[in-house]
């Protein structure tokens, strides 16, 4: 009987099977890290491990602090104030997130190095002859790397806080104004305390991106945990030592994830939905308005416009070299790998969510957490840094290759060699493990908006779950599948650390192709490829920004509807209490629309 029931739930079985495969790299890392026979890690612990950890911690502190100093005032200005250029900056300030940090690092290193235009100009103006005549900061240091990363990661803080400030408790802010508080006092006494949880959640995401960054740290020769994993594998060829370092990074990542998750729960429980009307914004005119515009312009110029102009200048100056056969070949390979990763990720998302839907029809409501558990486990890969994921992929695939070669040699006297790690299969698998969380979360939210009554109606007409999923659920999910697949495609095009460690001999993706020239101080030769990566990175940012603005508009619309309903209720007769009750229980209320928009925004931000 149990076997028959199991056969009737193929989607559930498939979802658990896929989750087991996706979790294999993480489990392999942990098991390999328990191997105590390798002496490389003990040597690292006695010599440089403390430096790796301390540099990583200082980078976390520096990047998070600078991102907060940049993103917090920008979010408050855009959400709470009216100043020249506000509509433009509301979306333009997210653009630096599309710029790879190592490209920004190259641009500013080229500008501020001894042979760069800034120091040459200073020497010409003041008559200095050699480095001993003056002091100039070295950007290739930990503080310099912190500034670079903050310039491209502050949009996380900006996006979260812009939405939070626009939904601040309107009553408290109006009371603060009536009591005579200045905008600055209202900012510190009301706005910042109300968004403290959102700030922590945003900084947790910034911290995870900082820990995961490899290219900038490697380019600046700063030893952090992510570069340690890379160097240990390629320098010492020690998988156990690389696995131990990877597990240490995982502990740091999961700690930040726990903090972010906790703050997200608090936000869902206690967030208010009040919002400011245009007439209630702080109007900044004259010097104050010019100062706000100048500050936003400076950050946007430093984080996006200047690097983009430099890339465009390289393309113009080296137009006969940037468009070459290598760019076409590696670009085509990147497109193919990203397309395969996007297709597999979307299929996996469908299987896991269809399994959860099938479980929902056969499980009590009290066990709803078990329905979402496979999707949550499969989404863990998104938190893994690229270098850590690459080591996790290498371990089980190498074991499978050894086992497969032994079996084939015994049976057919033939050894295929590196049939997994020596092909692009390893890269595609790593991309799927890392980015399948995007469509899983998006489809899960969309499936939650599909009424169970549709399933019940389909079953009453004699259709099984698979037929219902193919003919009802899938058409309704078509749009979100295309959007989430596009996001996976673009993220796969940009992924660098995993591709560096897993690429076969002689194989390059567009990201590795650009980084090789960056490492050789010849970015101008790959400037067209770099600009292509930036343009691709703009697409998901514009999608996320539009979702965030739609969520804010819905909140404002619902706030206006609620105020209108309250006024009509106050003018009603003695049955006003009944009218209010009917309004609160009315399923056509805009609250559902507001919650759906907010959830979609949260999925995109995650």
Image (cartoon, rainbow, N blue to C red):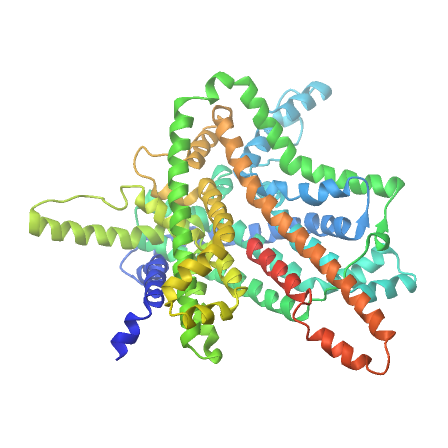
Q: Is residue 171 left or right of residue 484?
A: right
**Does 117 sit above or below residue 247?**
above
**Does 333 sit above or below residue 269?**
above
Q: Quadrant of the C terminus?
A: bottom right
Q: Is residue 407 left or right of residue 245?
A: left
**Does 239 sit above or below residue 310?**
below
* Residue 277 location (% of width, % of height): 81, 55
Q: Is residue 8 left or right of residue 480?
A: left
Closer-to-camera residue (382/450): 450
Residue 462 falls in image quadrant: bottom left
* Residue 213 location (% of width, % of height): 50, 46
Residue 535 falls in image quadrant: top right
Closer-to-camera residue (502/346): 346
Residue 137 falls in image quadrant: top right
Q: In the rendered image, is residue 323 in sight?
A: yes
Q: Quadrant of the N terminus?
A: bottom left
Looking at this view, name the residue that lies furthest to the bottom.
574
Q: In the rendered image, is residue 523 in sight?
A: no
Label tally: 0
**Does 120 sit above or below residue 46?**
above
User: Which residue is drawn at the image coordinates 23% and 54% (left, top)?
Assistant: 399
* Residue 340 location (% of width, % of height): 37, 44
Closer-to-camera residue (338/413): 338
């Amino acid at each position: 009987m149990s076997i028959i029931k199991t056969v009737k739930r193929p989607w559930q079985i498939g979802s658990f099977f896929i989750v087991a495969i996706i979790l294999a790299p993480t489990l392999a890392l942990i098991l390999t890290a328990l191997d105590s026979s390798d002496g490389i890690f003990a040597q690292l612990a006695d010599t440089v491990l403390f430096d790796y950890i301390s540099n990583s911690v200082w980078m976390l502190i520096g990047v998070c602090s600078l991102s907060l100093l940049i993103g917090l005032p920008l979010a408050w200005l855009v959400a709470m104030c009216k100043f020249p250029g506000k509509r433009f900056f509301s979306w333009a300030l997210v653009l630096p997130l599309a710029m790879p940090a190592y490209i920004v690092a190259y641009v500013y290193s080229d500008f501020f190095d001894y042979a760069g235009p800034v120091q040459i100009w200073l020497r010409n103006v003041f008559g200095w002859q050699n480095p001993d005549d003056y002091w100039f900061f070295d950007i290739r240091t930990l503080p310099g790397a912190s500034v670079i990363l903050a310039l491209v990661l502050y949009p996380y803080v900006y996006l979260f806080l812009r939405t939070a400030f626009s939904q601040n408790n309107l009553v408290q802010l109006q009371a603060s104004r009536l009591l005579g508080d200045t905008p600055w006092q209202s900012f510190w006494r009301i706005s910042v305390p109300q968004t403290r949880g959102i700030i922590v959640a945003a900084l947790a995401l910034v911290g995870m991106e900082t820990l995961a960054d490899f290219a900038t740290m490697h380019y600046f020769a700063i030893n952090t945990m992510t570069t340690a994993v890379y160097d240990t594998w390629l320098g010492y060829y020690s998988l156990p030592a690389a696995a131990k370092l990877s597990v240490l990074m995982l502990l740091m990542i999961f700690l930040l994830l726990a903090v972010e998750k906790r703050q997200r729960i608090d936000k869902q429980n206690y967030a208010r939905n009040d919002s400011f009307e245009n007439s209630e914004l702080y109007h900044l005119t004259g010097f104050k308005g010019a100062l706000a515009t100048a500050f936003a312009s400076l950050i946007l110029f430093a984080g996006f416009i200047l690097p983009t102009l430099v890339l465009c200048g390289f393309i113009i100056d080296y137009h006969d070299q940037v468009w070459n056969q290598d760019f076409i070949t590696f670009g085509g390979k990147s497109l193919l790998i990203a397309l395969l990763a996007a297709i597999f990720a979307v299929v996996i998302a469908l299987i896991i969510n269809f399994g959860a839907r099938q479980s929902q029809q056969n499980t009590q409501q009290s066990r709803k957490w078990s329905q979402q558990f496979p999707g949550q486990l499969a989404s863990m890969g998104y938190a893994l840094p690229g270098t850590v994921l690459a080591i996790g992929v290498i371990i089980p695939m190498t074991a499978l290759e050894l086992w497969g070669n032994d079996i084939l040699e015994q049976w057919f006297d033939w050894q295929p060699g590196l049939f997994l790690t020596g092909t692009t299969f390893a890269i595609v698998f790593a991309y799927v493990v890392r980015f399948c969380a995007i469509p899983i979360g998006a489809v899960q939210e969309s499936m939650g908006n599909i009424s169970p009554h549709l399933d019940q109606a389909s079953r009453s007409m004699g259709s099984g779950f698979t037929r219902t999923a193919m003919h009802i659920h899938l058409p309704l999910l078509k749009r979100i599948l295309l959007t989430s697949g596009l996001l996976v495609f673009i993220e796969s095009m940009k992924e660098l650390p995993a591709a560096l460690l897993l690429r076969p001999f002689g194989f390059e993706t567009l990201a590795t192709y650009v980084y090789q020239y960056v490492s050789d101080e010849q970015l101008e030769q790959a400037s067209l490829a770099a600009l292509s990566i930036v343009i691709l990175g703009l697409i998901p940012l514009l999608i996320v920004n539009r979702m965030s603005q739609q969520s804010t508009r819905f909140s404002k619309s619902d706030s206006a509807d609620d105020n209108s309903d309250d006024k009509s209720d106050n003018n009603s007769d003695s049955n006003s209490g009944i009218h209010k009750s009917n309004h609160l229980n009315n399923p056509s209320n805009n609250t559902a629309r507001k919650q759906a928009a907010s959830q979609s925004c949260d999925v995109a931000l995650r």
